[in-house]
Image: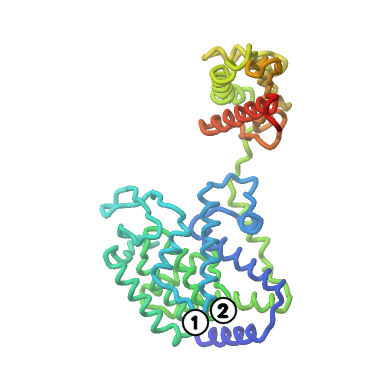
Amino acid sequence: MYNIFDKINQLKSELSGLTISDKDQRRLDEKFRLEFNYNSNHMEGNTLTYQDTKVLLLKDILPQGKLYEMRELDEMRAHDAAFMMIKEWATDPSREINQNDIRELNRIILVKDFYKDAIDLNGNPTRKKIKVGDYKEYPNSVLLQNGEVFHYADPIEVPALMGELMDWYRDEKDGLHPITLAAVFHHKFVLIHPFDDGNGRISRLLMNYILIRHGYPPVVIKSANKDKYLNALRLADAGDMESFITYIAEQAEWSLEIAINAAKGESIEEANDWEKELAMLSMREDTIPTLRTVENTLERMDDSIFPMLRELYKVIEEKFTPLFESSNFQCVFNQSDYNAYILHESPQYQNMAQSITPSINQQMKYVPSLINFKKNGLDIFGIQGVLYIDFTSRQYKIFMNEDPKFNCEKLISEILTEDEIQDILNEYCRRVVNEIKKKVSKLQW
């Protein structure tokens, strides 16, 4: 352990003697930001790749290609906000962290209350409500690889134990080596496990708060080394704290070397970065979206397209047609009129089979025409808004009047949800109202 600390002290001294340019500081901050957020979340099951994490956090662009759960995107952004927060706290000399700050970190990374699957004291599956920012209400434990169950502190003990932890930190923060202080604090926090969820991420955030406050770069626990990390924690549970401190020191050595390279204007990319990306790519599901066929096109006509068009027809007839002398509707697909399918609640969609050719892109047009507006004297006009449904090899896309600003794209295997149908109807009707307002002669546009 003394050898690694000799190396840590040497690297820290070298870093302190270097002046880093603004440009190199920015690329170093970006490197640690991506590495920490990606690895800490990936360790907890988040499936965003390193590259998609980069696109999301640095460019605020939703990743394309893989359909991530919105929860994964939200938790990555939230974790990033928490990381920025601890850096701000750590670099303010007048500010000391407290229990309220720790609860705030939990609130930030978990975003909002939610329900989570769990196991009760009798070993039966249950669901528990996770209240963000609150100390745990339920006992928590972890199943070890040897089959034993490791129990963390009971909920009733948490406030007192967290108070003791903060007292310990205040007593030791100026005496222990920063690496030792950060590692021991991390372990003590994990032993308490004060929250119903998010304890691992919070422990690593707090560890880095301590390191940054003492002038060290953040430590990144690589998700690829998760087993070594957890094993070092288990050794600390058994009383071997030195192994865990050494493990954290080894990660700090990597961070210091990266920071020194940046300060010297050298590359901070690791030689195996491409392997990390390739490994994550290989973990993606082996699923190319389903090809469009006659069968699945008919299914979408039955459960999505015509239900949507029927709802739109009803709204136009009930809300808009009374304002005009008459209305007319056309539904054209492959040069055939299918308007009767809208008026008929249960048509035989199989009759459309001959019109479907999956090997080429096809388009359906729905054309409601409102004829002669009755509310504007002799300034008579009509409104015609076209709704398009494009079918490609693997998707269908719904848009209006050839306007790409509003569209709904779905895989051919996906059904339109009720919310999506309502969004399309609302957008269509909003545009019709705006078109009427533009044509009313008394209004100035």
Q: Is residue 104 above or below residue 168?
A: above
Pick the front one: 177 or 109: 109
Q: Position of residue 73 (x, y in %)?
A: 55, 52
Measure how far apart labels 2 and 1 are at the Cα level.
Answer: 8 Å
Q: On the rendered structure, is 147 left or right of 3? A: left
Name the kind of residue labelled 1 in the image: Pro
Pick the front one: 271 or 181: 181
- Helix, strand or loop at mark 1: helix
Q: On the rendered structure, is 63 left or right of 111? A: right
Pick the front one: 367 or 185: 367
Mark 2 lies on residue:
216
Question: Residue at 60% of width from left, 55% of height from top?
Answer: 49
- Helix, strand or loop at mark 2: loop
Q: Are marks 2 and 1 in contact (CB under 8 Å)?
A: yes
Q: Position of residue 57 (x, y in %)?
A: 61, 58
Q: Quadrant of residue 50?
A: bottom right
Name the kind of residue labelled 2 in the image: Tyr
Mark 1 lies on residue:
178
Q: Quadrant of the C terminus?
A: top right
Label 2 or label 1, whichever comes before in sequence order: 1
